[in-house]
Image (spheres, grey):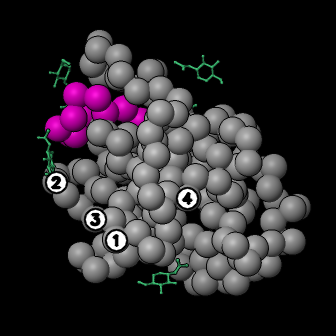
Amino acid sequence: MFFSRLAVLCTLPFLALGAKKRAVSSNFALYAYSEGFGGIPLFYADGYAYIGEVNQSNSSDAATVAFSLGSDDVWVGNPNTTLLTNATAPSWSNVTFYVPDDTTPDKRIGFLSSDESTDGAIETGFSFYGSTAVLIGETGALESNFFSLQISDRVHRLYWNDTSLGQVPIILRSVAPSNPPN
Ligand SMILES: *[C@@H]1O[C@H](CO)[C@@H](O)[C@H](O)[C@H]1NC(C)=O
Ligand SMILES: *[C@@H]1O[C@H](CO)[C@@H](O)[C@H](O)[C@H]1NC(C)=O
Ligand SMILES: *[C@@H]1O[C@H](CO)[C@@H](O)[C@H](O)[C@H]1NC(C)=O
Ligand SMILES: *[C@@H]1O[C@H](CO)[C@@H](O)[C@H](O)[C@H]1NC(C)=O
Ligand SMILES: *[C@@H]1O[C@H](CO)[C@@H](O)[C@H](O)[C@H]1NC(C)=O
Ligand SMILES: *[C@@H]1O[C@H](CO)[C@@H](O)[C@H](O)[C@H]1NC(C)=O
């Protein structure tokens, strides 16, 4: 169901966005949905974006991400401290969400701190269609090219527009599942 809707979504012109853009508040979390996932949270670990159970990450700095809106449709991430299972606070804050552009060979989705930059990182133009996360492309088209790859038990890494390793398509939404996922 999500995927037939997604195909339509990707072809919608920019103007279609206006009416629905403010459905999401300025502070939000992201949850992954697909045929396999009923809404699992997005977390940060070592500069990259993952979905799954943060306590299964091998990074001591991992935490689910509390997003807020920056200027130019930038999404700023901070650790969601209400979910931390570990007393040690993560060392990262105010990181900027990015996806790689077409010219970038590394298709992982990640976060940059204010003193970092990386070639080909798209950091502006993120928005929502309803509660579904999209990137507004250069032509104004809404793009949702999120994919995930399982890397360990209950941890999946996020990629943009890449199926070369067997990644599966997902949708990111700002809405938590009504029942906790298994
Ligand atoms: C990890 O988190 C999940 C979901 O919050 C929870 O069900 C599970 O018990 C946790 N596992 C450990 C080892 O803390
Ligand atoms: C964590 O796990 C990933 C994937 O299994 C691996 O690539 C990475 O090197 C590991 N990191 C650490 C710090 O062990
Ligand atoms: C908790 O923090 C300690 C110290 O930073 C770290 O060694 C450990 O791996 C962390 N545990 C979890 C589950 O994140
Ligand atoms: C932080 O996590 C809690 C518990 O899951 C959730 O209710 C809350 O919406 C999250 N806050 C943000 C800003 O993501
Ligand atoms: C994060 O950004 C906010 C808003 O710009 C600012 O008030 C806060 O001091 C920043 N925090 C850190 C740790 O840089
Ligand atoms: C997706 O990647 C392919 C190359 O693998 C590229 O031709 C295409 O333009 C990309 N699409 C988007 C929307 O970035």
**Foreground mark, 4 or 2?**
4
* Whether the residue under disc 2 has CB within 8 Å of ligand 2: yes
- Residue at (64, 54) in percent of width and height: 124
Residue 119 painted magenta: no
Earlier along the polypeptide chain: callout 2 or callout 1? Answer: 1
* Residue 140 in the image, given as x and y percentages of width and height: 75, 73
Q: Which mark is residue 152?
A: 2
Task: Sort mark 3 into few (<14), some (14-19) or many (20+) by Cα contacts within 10 Å.
Answer: some
Is there a contact, CB below 8 Å, between mark 4 and mark 2? no
**Left or right placement of residue 116 versus residue 29 in this view:** left
Q: Amino acid at mark 2?
A: Ser
| Stretch in magenta | 55-64
Task: Sort mark 1 into few (<14), some (14-19) or many (20+) by Cα contacts within 10 Å.
Answer: few
Residue of label 1: 105
Residue furthest out toward the top: 87
* Residue 73 in the image, given as x and y percentages of width and height: 71, 49
Mark 2 lies on a secondary structure that is strand
Mark 1 lies on a secondary structure that is loop
Depicted 88 relative to depicted 73: above or below: above
Separation of residues labelled 4 and 2 (CA atoms): 27 Å
Mark 3 lies on a secondary structure that is strand
Residue 62 appears in view: yes
Mark 4 lies on a secondary structure that is strand
Task: Sort mark 2 into few (<14), some (14-19) or many (20+) by Cα contacts within 10 Å.
Answer: few
Separation of residues labelled 3 and 2 (CA atoms): 9 Å
